């Protein structure tokens, strides 16, 4: 199959693209390589993809209708595009509070632009990466896809909810087969530096205090990027409309996650507690009943193993990874 992957130089997009290539698919990767975080991470991921046969890269912004029309037209010259995986996003709770317009341009207008391009160019399959943040402050734990939503706590959460609704509208109006995936706190090698796992590892290695909002008792369903990539491919191949939770189904207290980081790094860590963030939810936990039943998917990487993989990647790339900026805040992150 020929798959168009947006956000291909992003954390999840690169992992998904690698697996598509590994099973013999052709990938047209789209990314604008913006500076929402240190572009060296995006370039590192992209270099790995460019070395693989079957991968072609297009630098473009998903919110640019003319640019995406060109990308789709160019991709079709080499054969029909079987599906679009929209993994591009301006992700993160805290950045969306500071820069809501950028968040909405990519997450909402970008999704609309891609849906329109699919309709115009005859692409019948669309997969959207959404987020556990759409559950807001729902008191029900674990989160089920059919739970009534809680109050949304950030522009990012609202943008993802809007993108999900756009997919449902295009399925009803135009027969586009869409699948929505809700990711839970994804982490792993070459992860996003605006999320806590990368920051904690960097700060522990470099002997800096680990900054935590609140007392650290909040829990997160930390999920390996490898499991997320496998779940995304399962959804592409077998998924219905969804939405589907993709998480680890084993929430971990933040202080316990930090302890795992310290153990893997091999040195004690120092904590610096800050006031709780109003955009932070106390817990996330994915109910995986639907994903297990309909996708045949199961997470396989434990939190401890995932931390070990991230720490080893950082150790191997420390010369430049130590310079990556991690001072945008200290949110736990939800995607």
Image (cartoon, rainbow, N blue to C red):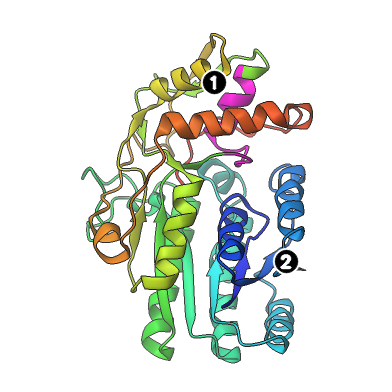
Q: Secondary structure at mark 2?
A: loop
What is the span of residues highlighted in magenta in the rendered image?
Answer: 189-204
Q: Position of residue 307 (x, y in %)?
A: 50, 30
Q: Is residue 203 magenta?
A: yes
| Residue at point 48%, 75% (across, down) | 126
Q: Which residue bears the numbered disc 2?
A: 53
Q: Is residue 166 toward the left or the right of residue 65 in the image?
A: left
Q: Distance of mark 2 from mark 1, alpha carbons? A: 42 Å
Q: Is residue 90 above or below residue 187?
A: below
| Residue at point 27%, 57% (across, down) | 292
Label 1 Cα neighbours within 10 Å, binned few <14 / some 14-19 / many ≥20: some
| Residue at point 69%, 83% (across, down) | 69
Query: Is the N terminus in the top left, top right, bottom left or bottom right quadrant?
Result: bottom right
Q: Position of residue 189 (x, y in %)?
A: 60, 39
Q: Is residue 262 above or below residue 139?
A: above
Q: Is residue 33 toward the left or the right of residue 239 in the image?
A: right
On residue 284, the disc is none
Q: Quadrant of residue 252?
A: top left
Q: In this rendered view, identify the residue nearer to me: 127 or 238.
A: 238
Q: Is residue 329 toward the left or the right of residue 34 in the image?
A: left
Q: Position of residue 164 (x, y in %)?
A: 41, 67
Query: How many numbered circles does the render carry?
Result: 2
Q: In this rendered view, identify the residue nearer to me: 305 or 32.
A: 305
Q: Position of residue 327 (x, y in %)?
A: 66, 30
Can residue 330 be seen here? The reply is yes
Q: Is residue 8 toward the left or the right of residue 115 in the image?
A: right
Q: In this rendered view, identify the residue nearer to me: 234 or 248.
A: 234
Q: Which residue bears the numbered disc 1?
A: 211
Can residue 165 be seen here? The reply is no
Label 2 Cα neighbours within 10 Å, binned few <14 / some 14-19 / many ≥20: few
Q: Is residue 248 above or below residue 239?
A: above
Q: Quadrant of residue 88?
A: bottom right
């Amino acid at each position: 199959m020929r798959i168009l992957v947006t956000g291909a130089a992003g954390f999840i997009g690169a992992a998904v693209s690698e697996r598509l290539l590994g099973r013999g698919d052709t990938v047209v990767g789209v990314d604008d390589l913006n500076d929402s975080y240190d572009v060296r991470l995006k370039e590192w991921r992209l270099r790995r993809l460019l070395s693989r046969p079957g991968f072609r890269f297009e630098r473009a912004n998903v919110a640019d209708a003319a640019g995406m029309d060109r990308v789709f037209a160019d991709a079709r010259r080499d054969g029909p595009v079987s599906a679009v995986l929209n993994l591009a996003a301006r992700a993160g709770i805290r950045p969306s509070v500071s820069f809501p317009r950028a968040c909405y341009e990519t997450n909402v207008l970008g999704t609309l632009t891609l849906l329109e391009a699919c309709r115009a160019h005859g692409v019948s399959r669309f997969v959207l990466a959404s987020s556990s943040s759409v559950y807001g402050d729902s008191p029900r734990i674990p989160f089920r896809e059919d739970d009534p939503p809680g109050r949304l706590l950030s522009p990012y959460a609202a943008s993802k909810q809007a993108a999900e609704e756009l997919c449902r509208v295009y399925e009803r109006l135009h027969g586009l087969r869409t699948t929505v995936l809700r990711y839970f706190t994804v982490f792993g090698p070459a992860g996003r530096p605006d999320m806590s796992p990368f920051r904690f590892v960097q700060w522990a290695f470099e002997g800096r205090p680990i900054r935590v909002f609140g007392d650290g008792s909040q829990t997160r369903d930390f999920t390996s990027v490898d499991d997320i990539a496998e779940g995304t491919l399962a959804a592409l191949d077998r998924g219905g409309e969804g939405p589907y939770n993709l998480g680890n189904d084993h929430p971990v207290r933040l202080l316990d996650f930090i302890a795992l980081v310290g153990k893997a790094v091999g040195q004690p860590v120092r904590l610096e507690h800050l006031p709780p963030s109003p955009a932070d939810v106390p817990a996330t936990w994915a109910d995986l009943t639907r994903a297990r039943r309909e996708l045949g998917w199961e997470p396989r990487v434990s939190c401890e193993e995932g931390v070990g993989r991230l720490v080893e990647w950082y150790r191997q790339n420390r010369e430049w990874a130590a310079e990556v900026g991690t001072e945008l805040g200290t949110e736990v992150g939800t995607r």
